[in-house]
Image (cartoon, grey):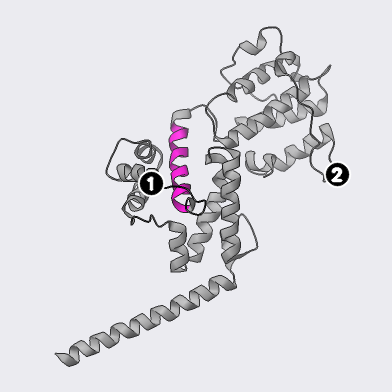
Amino acid sequence: MDPYLDAIPDDRGEGIKDLVRKRDGSDSEGRPAKRVGTDTSALLPPGGDEKDVEEPPKPEDDLDKYDRERLQKGLRYVDGAAKRKITPRTQVFLKLHKDAYEAALDGGKPEKASRAVVQAMDQVYSSAAFYFKPEDPDRLMHYVKLRRLELLANYGDYLGLDLQELRADLKAAAVGGSTEVQKAAGELGPPKTSLTIKEWAERNRTFDNQIRQYVTDCHWFDLAQQICRDLHELVNVAPDLDTAAKYEKVLVGIREDYFDVISDDDPHYWFPNETAKKLSQEKAARDKKRRGDDHSDIRQTRKGA
């Protein structure tokens, strides 16, 4: 995973990577060079690390306004925000954000290149596109809970996870129990969300998942849409980055099993590969035979009558 591209929305990630390379230089593979870690408390005035800044400072329109006092204020906010209950994606972003402030404060007068990185990160964090902020943690974590359950339902057996506890939670949600899942569905989900939860809970005891059903039914575009969406949201909703990486490995593996991919970001350009085409042909043959058997049974019934 690339922290800049995974944590920063839209097309800003590449632009910020360029600014960081200008600030720090590049390694042998063209990635931003790694900086030596800095003691945050040493960059703040005495007692400054104990003063929380509740609201994120607004981005400055002029780099010259990022003086030492302004940078220290921003660092205090980011350092405090990173300690709240937030998603993995926000954790990654705030780590980059904090590093930008520390780089600008480390040394004497902040250099223009360092201030430019801070300004860009401030702009991203204040934008509407950066929607996973720690400002409404309860509502956010309900959504995260719901998406984690969906990931478990679809991929848990691929990872060898025990789904007994999950099934009980889904069953309670389906019958109106006051679980976190039901609350998430009510607050954040469209009507389809509650229906999906009900469907999950009513599946058979082996807890078949939607991904396997798409494969069985040869619904390749539905499968492509689901995997593409899940890949994009992993870093938002997985409980930690290691878990996100495990899911990513599974999802990419399923994608490679059934698709020739032209564009990772657009499921319309995920084309069924030879394996998928063969499964579709086999399903079509079974369906044709089943229809023939059904017609034969009908004729025999009529003949006997």
Q: Name the residue nearer the viewer: 302 or 159.
A: 159
The kind of secondary structure the magenta stretch mainly shows is helix
How dense is the environment of label 1, judged by Cα within 10 Å: few (below 14), some, or many (20 and up)? Answer: few
Residue assigned mark 1: 164
Q: Is residue 134 above or below residue 183?
A: above
In the picture provided, is 118 more to the left or to the right than 279? right
Mark 1 or mark 2, earlier in chain: 2
Q: Is residue 268 above or below residue 141?
A: below
Q: Which residues are magenta?
A: 139-154
The magenta stretch spans residue 148: yes
Disc 1 secondary structure class: helix
Residue assigned mark 2: 28
As shown in the figure, which amino acid type bears the numbered disc 2? Ser
Q: Is residue 32 above or below residue 160?
A: above
Give how far across and how far down residue 43 sits, in percent. Answer: 74, 15
| Residue at x 47% of width, y 58% of height | 211
Give how far across and how far down residue 218 sits, in percent. Answer: 47, 68
Image quadrant holding the C terminus, namely: bottom left
Number of numbered tags placed on the structure image: 2
In the picture provided, is 105 more to the left or to the right than 246? right
The label on residue 58 is: none
| Residue at far top of view | 46
| Residue at x 74% of width, y 40% of height | 15
Disc 2 secondary structure class: loop
